[in-house]
Image (cartoon, helix red, strand yellow):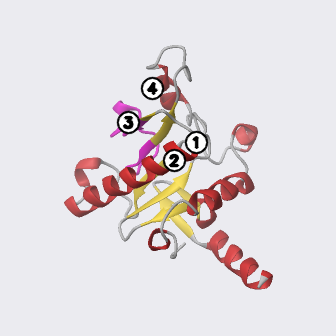
C-alpha cells in the first residue's frame, strides 16, 4: 500500500500545468474540473491564499470562452467556501487582475481567493497593495528563493486542501 502511495505521489510531482510563462507541479494542484484548476500560492499574502485558473493558457479574461468563464467561477465559488471554513475566515476577498495595467504579472487569467478576518490589515484595502507587490520577483530567481514557499510546503497544503472536496474534483490529480 505504501509503495502505491509513493508511486502516486511521484506521478503528481511529474505532472505539470501551464500557468502563463511558468509551470505548476501537479503536487501543488488541489482541485480540477474539465476546464479549470485550483492550486496553492507560491507566495501567499494571507494563509489560505489560493489561485484558480483556466487549464487553457489564456492571457486576458475577454479571450476566455463562455464555458471557461462559467467553469472557472463555479470552481471559485466551491473553493472559496471551503477555504474560508478551513482557514477560519469571516470574509473573503477575490481578485482578478486582467492585463499589465491592472497589475497582472502572470500571462494567464487567474483569480486570487483570500480568506479574510477582521484586522488582518490595518486598512482593509491594503490587501490590494499586497496583492500587487506579492509576486514581483521572478518565479525562477535563485536570489529570491528565500521569499518563496518550498515545494514540500506547497504540496502539503495541496494535499490538505484536496480532502475538502468531493473526489470528482480531485481524482484526476
Residue that label 2 marks: 83
Residue that label 1 marks: 87
Residue that label 4 marks: 128
Q: Nearer the viewer, mark 3 or mark 4?
A: 4
Q: Nearer the viewer, mark 3 or mark 2?
A: 2
- The image quadrant of residue 91 is top left
Residue that label 3 marks: 100
Labels 3 and 2: the sequence-earlier one: 2
Q: Is residue 105 left or right of residue 59?
A: right
Q: Nearer the viewer, mark 3 or mark 1?
A: 1
Q: Which residues are magenta?
A: 93-112
State how far apart marks 1 and 2 are (Cα). 6 Å
Callouts 3 and 1 close, C-beta under 8 Å: no
Labels 4 and 1: the sequence-earlier one: 1
Callouts 3 and 2 close, C-beta under 8 Å: no
Answer few, some or many: residues within 10 Å of disc 2's Cα (few below 14, many 20 plus, some between 14 and 19). many
Residue 140 percent across, percent down from the top left? 65, 48
Labels 3 and 1: the sequence-earlier one: 1
Residue drawn at 48 percent across, 29 percent down: 132
Amino acid at each position: 500500500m505504501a509503495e502505491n502511495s509513493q508511486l502516486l505521489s511521484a506521478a503528481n510531482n511529474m505532472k505539470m500545468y501551464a500557468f502563463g510563462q511558468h509551470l505548476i507541479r501537479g503536487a501543488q494542484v488541489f482541485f480540477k474540473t474539465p476546464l479549470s484548476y485550483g492550486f496553492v500560492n507560491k507566495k501567499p499574502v494571507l494563509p489560505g491564499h489560493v489561485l484558480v485558473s483556466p487549464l487553457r493558457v489564456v492571457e486576458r479574461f475577454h479571450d476566455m470562452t463562455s464555458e471557461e468563464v462559467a467553469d472557472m467561477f463555479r470552481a471559485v465559488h466551491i473553493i472559496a467556501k471551503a477555504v474560508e471554513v478551513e482557514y477560519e475566515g469571516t470574509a473573503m476577498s477575490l481578485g482578478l487582475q486582467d492585463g499589465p495595467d491592472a497589475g497582472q504579472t502572470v500571462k494567464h487569467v487567474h483569480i486570487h481567493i483570500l480568506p479574510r478576518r477582521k484586522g488582518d490589515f490595518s486598512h482593509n484595502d491594503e490587501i490590494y497593495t499586497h496583492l500587487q507587490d506579492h509576486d514581483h520577483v521572478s518565479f525562477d530567481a535563485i536570489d529570491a528563493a528565500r521569499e518563496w514557499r518550498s515545494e514540500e510546503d506547497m504540496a502539503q497544503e495541496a494535499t490538505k486542501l484536496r480532502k475538502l472536496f468531493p473526489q470528482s474534483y480531485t481524482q484526476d490529480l
